[in-house]
Amino acid sequence: MVLCKGVVCPFCGCLCDDLEVEVENGRIVSTKNACPVSRSKFLSHAEDRAKPMVGGREVSVEEAIGEAARILREADFPLIYGLSSTESDAQRMAVRLAELTGASLDNTSSTCHGPTVLAAQECGAVKCTLGEVKNRADLIVFWGCNPAEAHIRHPIRYSLTPAGMYRQGKKDRFVVHVDVRETRTSKMVNQFVKVQMGKDYELLSALRAALRGYEVKGAAGVPGEVIRGLAERMKGCRFGIIFFGMGLTMSRGKNLNIDAALRLVRDLNEHTKFLIMPMRGHFNVSGANEVLTWLTGYPFAVNFSRGYPVYNPGEFSAVDLLCREECDAALILASDPAAHFPAAAVRHLASIPTVVIDPKVSLTSKLARVVIPSAIAGIECEGTAYRMDGVPLRLKRIVDSPYLPDREILERIIERVGG
Amino acid sequence: MIIKNGTVYDPLNGINGERMDLFIEGGRMVEEAKGEVIDASGLIVLPGGVDLHSHVAGSKVNLGRLMRPEDHRRDPVPRTEITRSGTGYTVPTTYVTGYRYAILGYTTVMEAAMPPLTARHVHEELNDIPMVDKGAFTMMGNNHFVMKYLKEGNWENLRNFVGWLLKATKGYAIKLVNPGGVENWKWGKNVEGLDDRVENYGVTPREIIRGLARVNEELGLPHPIHVHCNKLGVPGGFGTVIETVETVMAEKARIHVTHIQFNSYGGEDWATLSSAAPEVAKALNRFAGATCDLGQVIFGEATTMTGDGPWQHQLFKLTGNKWYNSDVEMEVGAGIVPYTFKPKSLVNAVQWTIGLEVALLVEDPWKLVLTTDHPNAGPFYRYPKVIEWLMSKKAREKTLSEIHRVAPSRSTLPSLDREYSLYEIAVVTRAAPARLLGLKRKGHLGVGADADVALYEFREDDIEGSFSRARYVIKDGEIVVKDGRVVKECWGRTFWVSPPGELPEDARQEFERHYTVSLENYPVESEYLPRSEVIPCR
Amino acid sequence: MEVLLNTGRTVDQGVSMERGKTSQEYFEKVAVAFLHPEDAKALGVGEGGTVRITTEFGSVVLRCFLGNTERGSVFVPMGPWANALTSALTEGTGMPFLKGLRARIEAVPGGKPTTLEELLASWRGRSGSV
């Protein structure tokens, strides 16, 4: 029995690195410190594995790779999408492949925190790493996110209860939850503020106005005195932070909601130390943004048809390319758009030659012409992942597997495509 | 390979424009060799350029890229058979960074600021910069443990910690950025002077500077402490840089002051901004152990990015431009703000005079390195313009006539006649930085040196053009650039240092308590340095 | 009843997803809709009953549970059932509409939640309704 300590979890943007995993006879038998989803991922790692397929027929991995290369080579306007659940070397290979095939390259941030990036490209952002929050924050605002269900250990590792250098624990922190509905997160906090659906922009603007001394009577279903009280509390704290999620990025306003939040935080820095952090969903979507940015200059929705990177969210983002039926082939890596894209986009994906590289049987693989099974990053192969706050950690290989890492599969496709 | 009949400038070996043949074999300069002959008649031959301060890799550089799609759209770089695609302009992508340095004839580049917690990111990006040898400076001036041991007066622990941290980050040198000020910035404040106390730690910037300078020498590190001084960008704040130098000199240690232009401001406010280059140059002239790089302003677009969080916030307030802030627990901070230097802005024009003034007033060119603190004061591909200004009074006069009409009176630049010779240019772009970094096989062309060679066609009437595109660049004995184009992609190595030092016991527990990563996951694994070389300490 | 549709993560969705999206557990945890008890009462559906939710983009039958949302809205965990209802309109941002959509909800007494096979067929068959 082997005990692996300091294991980095490959599920969500928390990238907890204190997991302990027990391995017996090459199989994971138990985990410690893992949240329920993480535990599920580790313990079921060997289940439901994808098999190499072409046209519904099981084939050798080499044959599947060959067919994948053919599809990409022959496509006029291919899409390469996903990237967020694999490690940075695979992401680098994906950029190389996109460059060689003149593809559009997009990652899951386009349907997650892409709007955050769009807003930050307009006004920047005041950010920090999670340890700054743990050590210093006395005011925490969860806005449009639900860590209790989506970033399960975030409250105990970073934001709610841990003892930090200047904070003993929860009693030294005031925590606010702003959302359209009460969730399990609301039960952990000191104050819940219910905002009307689609009205976050109004509430954020009202806070900015209150901060500047304007009279605020109420907004988004929130009474004026609650808004004024919150503004005062934010102004008067020593170190505050807003954690935000899909409640802001996906609702009406999208990137404009984030823009308002970023500017609110910027305004607050006139009075005190205040920061903001997006709750990144996948464990390496941050990394996908980083890798694409250092190689192309752009974080997502990049196109290489002209031989150089061109950036245009809305034009080269995956949902758009699929809905407008512009791409004539797709390679889906480390993501499952059939499960998480609106059906209109999935229908086009089903109609074009699609290659799926995934450790598991994903819904997209059921629509794909080619399926190539890969090793699970962080369990069966090592690599780098970037946490929600940009901190890079090395994923470990806990068990061996017969599967190739994503990066190697991509390298072989690149070779066959002619790179 | 034989480089035949070129006019060689090799200051480290005292060669000043001699017509001679050079021989290369096995990637090194040798006494004699056979093989391919490069006809270098009519060309000048210099060692490959060494940039000892540039922001090219890591999380804040990438934030700079991320926040500026408009910067990249102006400068797309298509792929070729040999080279990858990418984008510029002020914060180019990694491949483009490598190619453009090579085209300039540079073969070694040091990343100026590496936060320990995100060192992995720096190395990942460095591994995607082709063509050049590289390294990165580990930031320590606002580090929790450094300040703690200084406060305790525990020199042994401090020395151990610093040695350990350099190894853990695979860093090359000790970097300080606004020491003490960035820790205060984590509460929204700054430091006002060298003897201000850092909140909760009770140490002063002076103590941090002195302590790290001392440790630097005790560990025998090749490079001096590399310091971005307190009170950067403050009119009238030039006294701080002089005091900083004096503090280190009193320790009998060395100091390298980086982008000294930004700390050399006289006057009382922005309206009365004047150059304090004469005072600063005087201090540099006085002290043998003090060196600097310029941080010369180039008019046009820039992206400011430093570890000086509070200063970057200030710049946001002054300009209203978009602003990224990035604080890293226990260690460092950073800020990024796009900026445009305009010749008709009085402030920018005065700033422009200062870097050149310092270069012309410091008597010994071996104490100076040409930089623009890329991309803070301008992109590195404009270094040839700085060379032109240094070599040609006429070129300076032309620019002086184009800037805000009051600016020349705020500086002594108009009165300076000195013109740099090619030899001196070779000093400030090759020989001096190599020597300062302690890289014995760089910056010269003597036997045993790495065969990193740059050949230019030098035209007196177009100095900038002459240095913008090398005729030939040889890296490790292979031709990689011809006529200003990359003809072969190659990969350099990462230099790092491995001084003695283990993490003190009491630090282990504190680390686990206050950081949000486990200690075992903190040090950079060797997988991140596929090609590396440890440079020995003295 | 007219409601606003909200979609998002739940722990059960995450855990069952890691077990496998073709699993019975995933079906049971994700082909669901959460309604406020008062709205459920007005609709005439109880805990565990089935409802049909329709938007201009599609329509699915889901098993209904009480709680986890406010009056006037229905919460469906992220996944293929939610996405049968969501809009692909990104308004030039790349981000489709996954929250805050107008939806109609009606009780389907004795109904059966739309199966994954039916969803797959709808994707392959290029038709909008299931």
Image: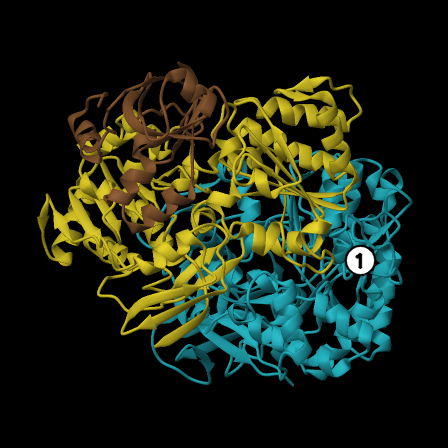
Q: Which residue is mark 1?
A: B230
Foreground residue, B171 or B162? B162
* Chain in cyan (letter): B
User: Going by the picture, which residue comes out furthest to the right?
Assistant: B268
Q: Residue at x 82, y 35 (%)?
A: B405
Q: Chain of mark 1?
A: B
Identify residue type, mark 1: Asn
Residue B133, position as x, y percentages in the image? 50, 68
- Comparing C36 with B454, the one in front is C36
Side of B346 where B44 appears, left or right: left
What's the residue at 40%, 51% (across, down)?
A: A37
Query: Where is residue A407 drawn, in percent x and y?
Result: 31, 58
Are there few (<14), some (14-19), or many (20+) residues within 10 Å of tag 1?
many
Position of residue B509 in the picture relative to residue B193 (left or right): left
Instruction: Name the side, left or right, on which C4 lies relative to A194.
Output: left
Q: Is residue C22 toward the left or the right of residue B134 in the image?
A: left
Q: Is residue A280 visible?
A: no
The residue positioned 65% from the left and 80% from the top of the image is B505
Q: Is residue C92 above or below residue B386?
A: above
Q: Which chain is brown?
A: C
Judging by colour alone, the chain drawn in yellow in this rendered image is A
Residue B186 visible at all? yes
